Image (cartoon, helix red, strand yellow):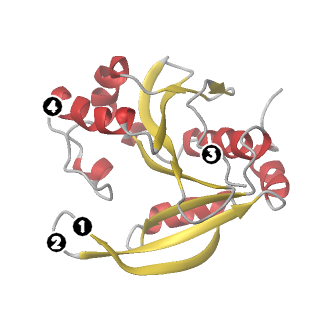
């Protein structure tokens, strides 16, 4: 049986709170990463240069029934610093993808990404009824690939000439997966230093 795409819900730990993405998050999101070409480099939309442009991109994510988008709120500041999304995985029963993710540069190489992934993967396996979480990235985005491997993603293959980039060149897409029975060991490793 195919699992249903989860609705955005509030998920939180000591580092982040994930909550359904809304237009109210746009001002914080623009401050976090708007107009920053490096933040948007690997995404499939042009870098938003204004709050209005970012609101338009957010609207495409919020209004698309194939996405369940969450704003990433940094607990320390209470401000949105990015977003992350569940996506449907056509052709794969009981699989869900985590993607369409970006964070402002100020939280790169912090606990934010790992904290988000632990919350989303836990929710997918424990509540969502999934048995596989998929993650994908551009074959040139080695930083993202390293992050996916670090949380336990297993390289499942590369889709060659998967889609054109904004500059007209072809993106090969690297696909990773985490299975429900693989996750507990990774979760222990990733959360062993959390404080109660």
Cα distance between the residues tagged 4 and 3? 28 Å
Mark 4, other Cα within 10 Å: few <14 / some 14–19 / many ≥20: few
N-term mark: 4 or 2:
4
Q: Residue 151 in the image: state x and y as whole percent.
A: 67, 57
Cα distance between the residues tagged 1 and 2? 5 Å
Is label 4 in a helix, a strand or a loop?
A: loop
**Quadrant location of residue 60?**
top left
Residue at mark 2: 168
Residue at mark 4: 50
Is label 2 in a helix, a strand or a loop?
A: loop
Nearer to us: label 2 or label 3: 2
Cα distance between the residues tagged 1 and 4? 22 Å
Please name whichever residue, 169 or 6, is drawn nearer the observer in this view of the structure: 6
**Residue 41 falls left or right of residue 124:** left
Q: Residue at x 49, y 79 (%)?
A: 158
Residue at mark 3: 117
Asked whether the viewer can see residue 153, the reply is: no
Confirm or deny contact between disc 1 and disc 4 (CB under 8 A).
Answer: no
Mark 1, other Cα within 10 Å: few <14 / some 14–19 / many ≥20: some
Cα distance between the residues tagged 4 and 2? 24 Å
Q: Which mark is residue 165?
A: 1
């Amino acid at each position: 049986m195919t699992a249903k795409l989860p609705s955005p819900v509030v998920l939180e730990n000591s580092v982040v709170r994930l909550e359904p993405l809304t237009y109210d998050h746009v001002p914080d999101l623009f401050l976090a990463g708007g107009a920053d070409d490096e933040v948007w480099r690997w995404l499939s939309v042009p870098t938003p240069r204004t709050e209005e442009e970012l609101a338009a991109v957010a609207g495409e994510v919020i209004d698309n029934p194939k996405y369940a988008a969450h704003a990433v709120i940094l607990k320390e500041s209470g401000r949105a610093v990015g977003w992350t999304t569940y996506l449907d995985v056509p052709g794969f029963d009981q699989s869900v993808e985590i993607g369409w993710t970006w964070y402002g540069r100020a939280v790169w190489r912090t606990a934010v990404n790992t904290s988000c992934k632990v919350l989303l993967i836990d929710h997918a396996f424990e509540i969502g009824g999934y048995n596989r979480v998929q993650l994908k990235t551009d074959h040139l985005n080695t930083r993202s690939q390293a992050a996916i491997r670090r949380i336990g993603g297993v390289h499942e293959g590369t889709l060659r000439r998967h889609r054109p980039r904004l500059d007209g060149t072809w993106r090969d897409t690297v696909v990773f997966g985490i299975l429900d029975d693989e996750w507990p060991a990774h979760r222990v490793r990733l959360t062993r230093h959390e404080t109660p």
